[in-house]
């Protein structure tokens, strides 16, 4: 029993560390929450969480073997991710800074949140590492448990960034301040893209 508890705590810790630390997803969610409010930002939060858990499940069911055998897959994901992050940073940098009080439909979608995960090489590596460490023996029941646990921890962790954004939203009273904030977020996204290129 203590062994199982220790395993689940290790899984939860892995999920927390890989979810709550700053990265493309958290930057996207923070920026969305500042511009559109907390509830609209939950769309990319859910998308990123569901997208990663689906990736984790697929990798756990054997995709990691294909990734190891065909390294070009990782290279393609890397370049697609860099291009996507570059596009997101451009959109943020050129945004007019108007805070939407009507919670427009323009806020990032569930699909956008999932796309950030699927085009993030770090998410792929985290999936491979997580399944390699915790599901090395191919136990499908344990894999499902890991995915469910990861969903809860990841959603909660990324949602904290939406809370932070909604808090900041109250202090960014004019378009000029929001533009400065957006450009800072754009610079961080661009830095993520450059980091991916160099590693």
Image (cartoon, helix red, strand yellow):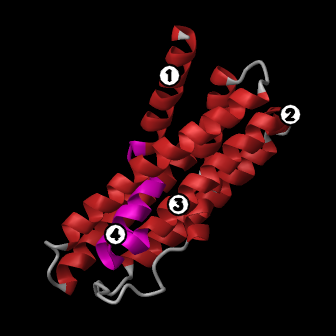
60 with respect to 92 (left or right): right
191 with respect to 148 (left or right): left
- CB atoms of marks 2 and 1 within 8 Å: no
**Of the residues under marks 4 and 2, which one precedes in the sequence?**
4
Q: CA distance from mark 4 to mark 2?
A: 42 Å
Name above or below for residue 141 compared with residue 101.
Answer: above
Q: Magenta stretch containing residue 127, yes or no? A: no
Q: Which residue is mark 3?
A: 46
Q: Is residue 192 visible?
A: yes
**Of the residues under marks 2 and 1, which one precedes in the sequence?**
1
Residue shown at 29% from the left, 87% from the top: 101
**Of the residues under marks 1 and 4, which one precedes in the sequence?**
1
Q: Position of residue 190 (x, y in %)?
A: 44, 60
Please identify the quarter of the rendering in which residue 110 is found.
Answer: bottom right
- Crowding at mark 4 (Cα within 10 Å: few <14, some 14-19, many 20+): many
Q: CA distance from mark 2 to mark 1?
A: 29 Å
Q: CA distance from mark 1 to mark 4?
A: 30 Å
Residue shown at 33% from the left, 53% from the top: 160
Find numbered disc 1 in the image and state the secondary structure of the residue it sits on.
helix
The boundaries of the magenta stretch are 20-41
Q: Which residue is mark 1?
A: 10
Q: CA distance from mark 3 to mark 2?
A: 31 Å
Q: Which residue is mark 2?
A: 69
Name above or below for residue 123 compared with residue 164.
Answer: above
Q: Position of residue 106 (x, y in %)?
A: 47, 84
Q: Position of residue 49 (x, y in %)?
A: 55, 53
Query: Observer-nearest residue: 177 or 199?
Result: 177
Q: Quadrant of the C terminus?
A: top right
């Amino acid at each position: 029993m203590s062994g199982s508890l220790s395993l689940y705590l290790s899984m939860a810790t892995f999920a927390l560390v890989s979810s709550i630390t700053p990265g493309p997803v958290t930057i996207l969610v923070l920026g969305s929450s500042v511009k559109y409010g907390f509830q609209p930002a939950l769309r990319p939060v859910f998308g990123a969480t569901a997208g990663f858990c689906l990736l984790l499940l697929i990798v756990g069911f054997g995709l990691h073997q294909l990734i190891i055998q065909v390294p070009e897959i990782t290279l393609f994901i890397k370049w697609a991710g860099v291009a996507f992050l570059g596009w997101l940073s451009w959109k943020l940098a050129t945004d007019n800074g108007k805070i939407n009080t009507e919670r427009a439909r323009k806020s990032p979608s569930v699909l956008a949140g999932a796309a950030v995960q699927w085009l993030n090489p770090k998410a792929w590596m985290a999936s491979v590492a997580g399944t390699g460490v915790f599901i090395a023996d191919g136990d499908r029941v344990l894999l499902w448990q890991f995915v469910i646990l990861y969903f809860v921890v990841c959603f909660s962790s990324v949602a904290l960034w939406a809370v932070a954004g909604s808090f900041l939203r109250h202090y960014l009273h004019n378009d000029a301040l929001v533009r400065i904030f957006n450009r800072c977020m754009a610079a961080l996204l661009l830095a993520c893209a450059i980091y991916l290129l160099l590693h």
